[in-house]
Amino acid sequence: MISSVLVANRGEIACRVFRTCRELDIRTVAVYSDADENALHARVADAAVRLPGSTPSETYLRGELIVKAALTAGADAVHPGYGFLSENADFARAVLDAGLVWIGPPPEAIEAMASKTRAKELMAAAGVPLLAPLDPDAVTEADLPVLVKAASGGGGRGMRIVRELADLKGELKAASAEAQSAFGDGTVFVEPYVERGRHVEVQIVADTHGTVWAYGTRDCSLQRRHQKVIEEAPAPALAPGVEERLHSAATAAARTITYAGAGTVEFLVSGDDVHFLEMNTRLQVEHPVTEAVFGIDLVALQLGVAEGAPLDGDPPQASGHAVEARLYAEDPAQNWAPQTGTLHRLSVPGIRLDTGYEDGDTIGVHYDAMLAKAVAYAPTRAEAVRRLAGALERATIHGPVTNRDLLVRSLRHEEFTTARMDTAFYERHLADLTTAAPDPYAPLAAALADAHGRSRFGGWRNLPSQPQTKRYASAHGEHEVHYRHTREGLTADGVRVLSAAADLVVLEIDGVRRKFDVTRHGDRVYVNTTALTVLPRFPDPTAQQAPGSLLAPMPGTVARIADGLTTGSAVQAGDPLIWLEAMKMEHKITAPATGTLTALHATPGQQVEVGALLAVVQQEPPL
């Protein structure tokens, strides 16, 4: 029997595994980097072991340090979570060689699926339907569009859609460079890209006695940068017979590699066609939706299989529908740029929330930008979707910019509510989903709340005062509002102020009474779901950058610089010049105009803060 589990991971998944361990009276051990010294997963574990360093390569990717930590802390088992070393066969072997229980599939099964190209060969031999890889040197116009994919790793890294033959060579090189940086393996391959395909997967659990269970289906089609954003179970609106074919193929895949434990087999579905994509030999991020509809605990099943227990009887029957949304600290309107800073408040009441953060925690630059997974369950899909959208809309999220508004709009989009979505959903709709009218009265409510707070110390003025002005910035631009102190209190043109307190303002607008909850953290003000930054009354004229300046849009590491780029290089508008890596994603910095690079301050491996000057492009004068 397992008595103590070390989770070789961090954040939300570590906290999730710890929760089941506590329910089963199993002691928990965390590992943490220097950047995670005060992280939630390190705080809630029974014991925690430091991994010196901050970057993943120094800490969570050091298998020998993690095995040593498990032995030092007295753990008798290791759970890998997802990401990092969760699909590393050598790490699994090292855990077993140390006399510890590995809560995962056999190393040989991990190895068989580690390379997507090798996995496809195995699945083809087993009769599992798939897309045949293409020879990159033989791709023609007739083959387009194609998808370039990294042979190792996942999470959308090293993946490119190519629609123009002239772009293929450059995208192969870029994907290989990203894959090498992310996984230490720059091998890539090419396969046909299926337009309007759906990403559907099957959760399987296998024991060590020959039983393999398939737990329904999940749809994960809403993706940004090939990374999942919204997932649900069961997959809606599948053609007749498709679910049975998916279950059959997933079970065959598991049996082919003598699988044991929890895993996921991923497919691309287009109408009646089913194509094997890959097998994830670990627990998936989106596992809670399967847990909800089947009434199971997949982590508990993992622990049972690792202890040698057989799966009992038949798998339970599915009931109802569950939808999960990944809440990210990122700005979808700014090319999904990750955000950092203090998370002052995070509350999504009424539904399941899996997170690795608590109020006051810091969101850093080294790791994934996911704050939490919000999961809603209901008897029907329509009810579950409505419940999740409503919970997110009413959520209190004070801190860095998040994708919350995008999630709410996505869940309410007609293509999603009618189950007609596919993996290109955001390619078609991102502009509309990120262009929304701001609440025009939020800045006024912020100003009135601030005015009330200031007036508490001196009382209301006896005489009418001059109009007061406040300036704020939001995602929609800058706002200037005006109000006045009078004998009756605060007034604003065109709006009746019913009450104004430091945390609540009530206005009557066109005969309708509206409430505005106001919270302030430093120079940031949150009015209902609108985030505002207090601006000085008069702009600072010195806060200017030279035209053509390329500034870091987020804190991160300079991953690489375009080949041959030096001061004096001629560049074309839109040319990729610098790649920044932040929160496990690469962000391309492009030339803002055609001209000459007059300054280059970025160097590979350099750590930069948001707003740092990376380079300057002097635009060519017009002819």
Image (spheres, helix red, strand yellow):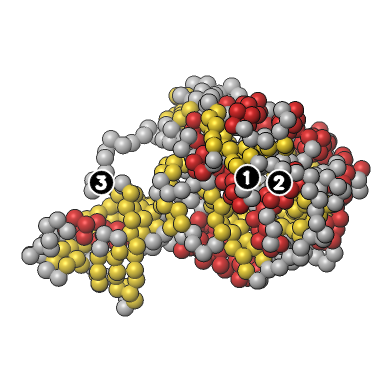
Left or right, 298 with respect to 436, comes to right
Element carrying mark 2: helix
Residue 6 image point, x, y percent: 62, 37
**Disc 1 marks which residue?**
26
User: Does label 1 or label 2 sit earlier along the sequence?
Assistant: 1
Residue 461 image point, x, y percent: 10, 62
Which numbered marker is on residue 303? 2
Kind of residue indicated by mark 3: Pro
Label 2, label 3: how far apart the Cα atoms are = 56 Å
Residue 45 image point, x, y percent: 54, 41
User: Does label 1 or label 3 sit earlier along the sequence?
Assistant: 1
Label 1, label 2: how far apart the Cα atoms are = 10 Å
Element carrying mark 1: loop
Q: Residue at x 29, y 69 (%)?
A: 506
Residue 360 image point, x, y percent: 41, 46
Report which quarter residue 97 is drawn in. top right
In this view of the protein, can residue 504 be seen by the observer?
A: yes
Kind of residue indicated by mark 2: Leu
